[in-house]
C-alpha cells in the first residue's frame, strides 16, 4: 500500500466509525438516473413504449421535505410511508412503511380502467405504471433500510443522518448506474475536464388528472400520514400537479448528468462504501429492483375487474 492508499483506507475507516452507529449500515437509495434506467430496462423487457422511463420519477415530483426539517405529507402519500415525527420539526426522521395497502397504483389502475374506460389514455397508463415501477425500486432499497435521523435527535444530527445515510447514497447510486449501466461497455465515461462524455437527458412526464385521482383515493380511504393517526393531504388541482412535474423536469433535463463529475465521484464513493453501499451491492440491488418493478407493473396491468 502506498502512502495515498493508506490515507484513503484511514479516511474510509474514520467515515465508518463516524457514520455507522448500529442500524445505519444498510441504507441505500436511488436517484432519478437510476430510476430512469430501471424503467428503461423494464420497458425493454416488457415491450412498453420507448418514453416509459420519462414516467419513472413520478413519486419524487413531491419533495421529501418542507423547508429544511419537516417531512412533506405529499411525500408520505407518494411513497406510501408514515411520518413518525407527526409533522413536527426537526424532521428527517426515518419514516415508517406501514405496508397496509396504501400504494395507490392498484386503486388508480382499477378505477381508471373500469370507470374511465375509453377516457383511460396511454398517458395515464404510463403514469400509473411508472409510479409502480418507481415505488417497487424504492422498496428494494428503502423498505428495511430507510434511515434518517432518530426520534429525539436535534436538527443538525437528523440532517447529517439523512444526508450521509440517504441523500449522498442516492447520488452515489446514480454514479454507479451511469458508469456501469447507462454508458455502453467500452465507451469512455468522462471527458478530460471530468464532465460526462454521454449527455443523458431525463424528461419527466405525468398525467396530472390520474395523480389527482390517486390523492383523492388516499383521502377517501382515510389514509393518515402521521404515526399518531393525524394529518393527511388535500388533493391538488391539475395546475398544481403540472407545476410539480415541470419543476422536477427543469431540475433534471438537459442534461440530467450535468451534476455528475469524475472529480466529485471519489467523495461519494468513500462515504457510500464505508456504509456498505459498495458498487457490487448497488448493482445487485439494481437487478432486484428491475425484477420487482417488472413484477409490480405486470400485477397492476393484469388487475381484473
Ligand atoms: Zn422515490
Image (tube, rainbow, N blue to C red):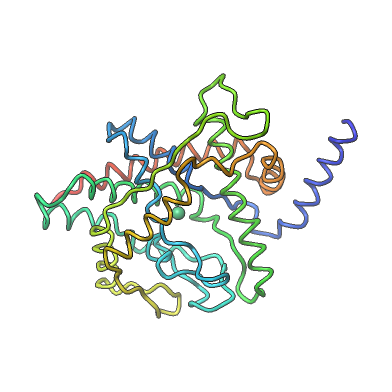
| Residue 149 falls left or right of residue 39 | right
In the rendered view, tell whether residue 121 sits above or below residue 152. above
User: Closest to the observer: 60 or 246?
Assistant: 246
Q: Position of residue 247 (x, y in %)?
A: 42, 57
User: Which quarter of the image is occupied by the N terminus?
Assistant: top right
Nearest the camera: 99 or 244? 244
- For the point 39% across and 62% down, which residue is it? 80
- State the image quarter where residue 253 is shown: top left
Q: Is residue 123 above or below residue 190?
A: below
Q: Position of residue 25 (x, y in %)?
A: 65, 53
User: Which residue is at a point 58% across and 33% down the rendered structure image?
Assistant: 196
Identity of the residue drawn at 62% across and 37% down: 279
Q: What is the x, y in percent for residue 160?
A: 67, 63
**x 28%, y 59%: residue:** 211
Instruction: Tell me residue 183's x, y (percent).
Output: 52, 28
Farthest residue in the top direction?
186
Task: Answer with left or right where residue 21 lies relative to residue 68.
Answer: right
The front one of 176 and 63 is: 63
Amino acid at each position: 500500500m502506498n502512502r495515498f492508499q493508506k490515507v484513503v483506507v484511514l479516511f474510509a475507516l474514520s467515515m465508518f466509525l463516524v457514520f455507522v452507529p448500529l442500524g445505519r449500515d444498510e441504507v441505500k437509495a436511488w436517484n432519478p438516473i437510476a430510476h430512469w434506467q430501471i424503467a428503461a430496462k423494464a420497458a425493454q423487457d416488457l415491450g412498453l413504449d420507448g418514453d416509459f422511463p420519462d414516467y419513472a420519477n413520478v413519486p419524487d415530483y413531491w419533495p421529501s421535505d418542507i423547508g429544511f426539517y419537516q417531512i412533506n405529507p405529499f411525500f408520505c402519500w407518494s411513497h406510501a410511508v408514515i411520518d413518525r415525527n407527526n409533522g413536527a420539526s426537526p424532521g428527517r426522521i426515518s419514516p415508517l412503511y406501514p405496508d397496509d395497502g396504501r400504494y395507490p397504483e392498484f386503486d388508480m389502475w382499477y378505477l381508471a380502467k373500469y370507470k374511465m374506460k375509453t377516457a383511460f389514455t396511454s398517458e395515464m397508463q404510463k403514469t400509473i405504471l411508472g409510479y409502480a415501477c418507481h415505488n417497487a425500486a424504492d422498496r428494494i432499497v428503502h423498505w428495511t433500510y430507510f434511515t434518517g435521523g432518530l426520534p429525539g435527535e436535534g436538527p443538525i444530527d437528523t440532517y447529517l443522518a439523512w444526508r450521509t445515510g440517504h441523500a449522498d447514497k442516492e447520488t452515489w447510486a446514480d454514479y454507479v448506474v451511469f458508469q456501469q449501466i447507462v454508458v455502453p461497455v467500452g465507451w469512455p465515461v468522462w471527458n478530460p475536464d471530468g464532465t460526462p462524455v454521454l449527455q443523458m437527458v431525463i424528461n419527466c412526464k405525468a398525467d396530472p388528472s390520474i395523480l389527482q385521482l390517486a390523492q383523492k383515493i388516499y383521502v377517501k380511504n382515510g389514509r393518515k400520514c402521521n404515526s399518531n393517526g393525524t394529518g393527511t393531504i388535500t388533493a391538488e388541482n391539475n395546475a398544481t400537479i403540472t407545476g410539480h412535474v415541470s419543476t422536477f423536469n427543469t431540475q433534471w433535463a438537459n442534461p440530467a448528468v450535468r451534476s455528475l463529475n469524475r472529480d466529485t465521484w471519489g467523495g461519494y464513493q468513500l462515504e457510500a462504501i464505508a456504509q456498505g453501499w459498495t458498487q457490487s451491492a448497488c448493482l445487485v440491488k439494481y437487478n432486484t429492483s428491475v425484477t420487482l418493478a417488472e413484477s409490480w407493473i405486470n400485477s397492476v396491468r393484469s388487475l381484473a375487474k
